[in-house]
Amino acid sequence: MPRKVTGGGLTTVDKYYQDYGCRARELKKQGKQIIGYLCAFTPAELITAAGMVPFRIKGDVNEPITKADTEMETIVCPLVRSCFDMALKGKYEFLDGIVIPHACDSICRTYDVWKYSLNLPYAHFINMPHGTGDASLEFYQEVLNTFKTSLSKFAGKEISDGALTEAIKLHNQNRARVKELYQLRKASPPQISGEELTKVLITAMSLPVEESIEMLGEVIAEVKGRGALSAQKPARIMVIGAQVDDIAFIKLIEDSGAWVVADDLCPGAREFMAQVDVTPDPIAGLAERYLRKIKCGRTYREMEGNYQEYLEDRFGHMGRMVDDFGVDGVVLYIYKYCDPFGFEVPQIKSYIEAKGTPVLYLEDEYSMSTIGRLRTRIQAFLELLVK
Amino acid sequence: MTEEKKPEERKKRRTATEAASKIGPMVRASIGGTVQAREEGKPLAYTFICCCYDEIIRAMDVVPVWTENYAGVCGAKRDAQRFLERAESENFSRSLCTYALCGLGFDAWREELGEMPPESPWGGQARPDMMLGSGQLLCDPRNKWYQAAQHYMPDVPIYDVGLPWPAYENDYDYREVQDYYVKYIVEELKGLVKFLEKHTGKKMDWERLSELVELTDRTWDLIWEAYELRRAVPTPMGTGDAMNTMVPMVFMMGTQEAYDYYKDLYDELKVKIANKEGVIPDEKYRLIWGGGLPSWFALTDFNYFNSKGAVFPVETTYRMIEATYNFDMDLSKITDPLEHIAWRWVKFWTYWHDRARKRPGSHPDVERLIKYIEDYKIDGIVMHEAFSCRSWHVGLIWQLNLLKKVYRDIPSLILESDIVDISSYNEADTRARIDAFIDTLEAVKSR
């Protein structure tokens, strides 16, 4: 697939970040089919295997939500509303279809709103179960096969196991590169800022996987080549939350005198750390990854052992990241109307605090209008950390 | 924790039917019964409505503690705020489901005290031995609430039942996938039975379960027949009453008491129709409650509608049944009780798909509205958007837009408030909006 932008990794990233979707628009003009999707629970591998470009729809914290309110209730998660608003305003006019997974109520309950309002040639809902037991896994495999059949019908060609396996390998390679990039956050000061990394990950959501792999390779080489960042800041922060698809919040923390060095976010560690096993039936590997390996509040993990063990199962990866990345403080950043994460706040907060790391819980509305208030809270938290 | 002043007792709302007026004491007795059951050492489970497990828990003699119901009672008694505030102080956002927040605030307080919070409505919500959540195509709180409650009750185990149903799609029919949905649900229900057997030390009585499943089918059919009587002009029962008569449907399914209740309701409605006795004597506007749970603290708004000559012969909310004999399969031939429950579930949620398929651009939810509009001679639609609940309150605007597109323009009103949180409600504003809506209905009628 030909690249249109050159000039090094982070320059490319900046261009694609500033004009999100520009590459998909170009590819559309070249005859590619672009499938938009919401949430990290959409198995993009299947879209790639169908010969189409998976494109993650994002919102815009700088754009007031206006048009969406004529079709979608304001009690929906503000991120989803912003995404829908951008779609209604023509930002994603290049889409040929939309795929929405059963992620949370705000996403799941608006599927029909998206489908009927955008009226794209293709729409599909992936009915992912909540549970992770064997019956749920088997059911989810059936669901993914239904998606595969549906997408094949739209593509006009069968998605072969071979093509799907190749797509899985490509997406694994993409994730491996992100993982490599994360290693560069461990140094003190880190080799890549939180703001830069967030831009890279957001950009990756908008590119065909082959181009994303290439872009990540260039970024890694560039970042390694330049060495550690010059400024030594007194605190290293981890951010935990749902989807953060804008640099504004990360930049706010870094402008306030800290490095953001770790996260449990989408796009971020939550979705990029787990790989798909290459299995004889590729659907089996996909189902295992999306249902069991990604640890997200939307998935109900059955309790085994005692309650403390259950907390370890659900949040242990967060605790390990705190240790591995030398995190001084955690910001729990949750959007209003977010059911999967909102209900977990007391548990996550007490789990991390019990390990001796302070936690700041912030509720936000996915809008630049709240930045001033957030800055005050962040600054106060950082003062507390460096005392 | 500051204790709020105990709210004033409100006057009992006037109901049109005897059946509806019986509900308050029944709910009170039911909640009191759970507290007593706790003292007697009977197994108690926190439960959600519409989770397929009614007959299973009844057959296992597990006492259900309907947590949504208790939050609704606190809301109706205007005594939920102190529990909501407690939840907020625990770092739960006030934008989350207020049923859940009320319950979590209550649990946190009860566990801290080791006894019921002071002056708990109707004796309080009993501590459970287990919690039965569910994963569906709606309502995240059904699997997040009890998980969050474990923060206060880490010793109480949860079983989460996966209960999906097929979405309405353009490129395939639900019948192409229904078998694997049913298979999954059956496995999930088998898991539930095992879980209950483990935690009660009792074996499932499969014969009894089959009887209760058959009783539930009959109850579904009877409810449908009773509710269809409301097509009559004047209608003998409105949505205000239906917000009471739903209680046996969702909290007592799988019991003879529920069946008998609807038999009484059916008989009462027949008599009223024979006597031409309507909710109000001069019925001017017939409305559908087309979506959204009610504000439990403001059910008198239905009476306000009545005072303006408006009645609600039908609603989509809490009509969680269909006549099983109208399904495209003979359920009675499914003898395995768990399979039977699973098929009933899938057929209920796909019931309107075929109608939607016949009208280009339509959708099952909209088809249901159209059918009710025609069958019940409806002049206007009222919906309620409860800010804290995305399960039932998202897609309302879209449904109205689509209805206009594929059917016709019909006067509509979306009220905004909440199910439990009274701070979201303004009676004067609400009634001003109702007045304006009535004016619109009048203008349309006069055309």
Image (spheres, rainbow, N blue to C red):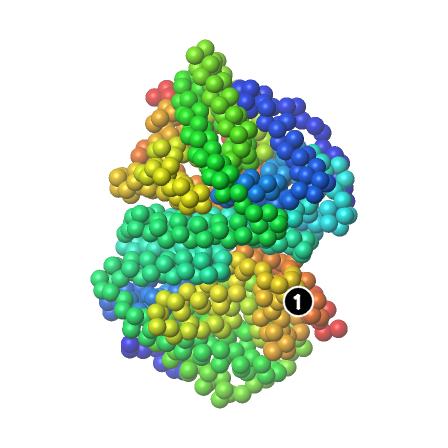
Expressed as whole percent of the image width and height from the top left, the position of residue B300 reads 58, 26
What residue appears at the point 69 percent right and 70 percent down from the top-left corner? A355
Q: Is residue A167 above or below residue B56?
A: below
Q: Is residue A73 above or below residue A268?
A: above
Which type of secondary structure does the marked residue at label 1 adopt? helix
| Label total for image | 1
Q: Is residue A288 left or right of residue B431?
A: left
Q: Residue A382's image quarter?
A: bottom right
User: Which residue is the site of mark 1?
Assistant: A352
Say which of A57 and B27 sits in front. Answer: B27
Expressed as whole percent of the image width and height from the top left, the position of residue A11 reads 42, 78
Q: Is residue B143 above or below residue A314?
A: above
What residue appears at the point 53 percent right and 43 percent down from the top-left corner? B205
Specify the subunit that label 1 lies on.
Answer: A
Q: Which residue is farthest top?
A: B275
Expressed as whole percent of the image width and height from the top left, the position of residue B139 reads 51, 48
Q: Quadrant of the C terminus of chain B?
A: top left
What residue appears at the point 49 percent right and 73 percent down from the top-left corner? A273
Q: Is residue A124 left or right of residue A103?
A: left
Residue A303 seen anywhere in this rendered image of the structure? yes
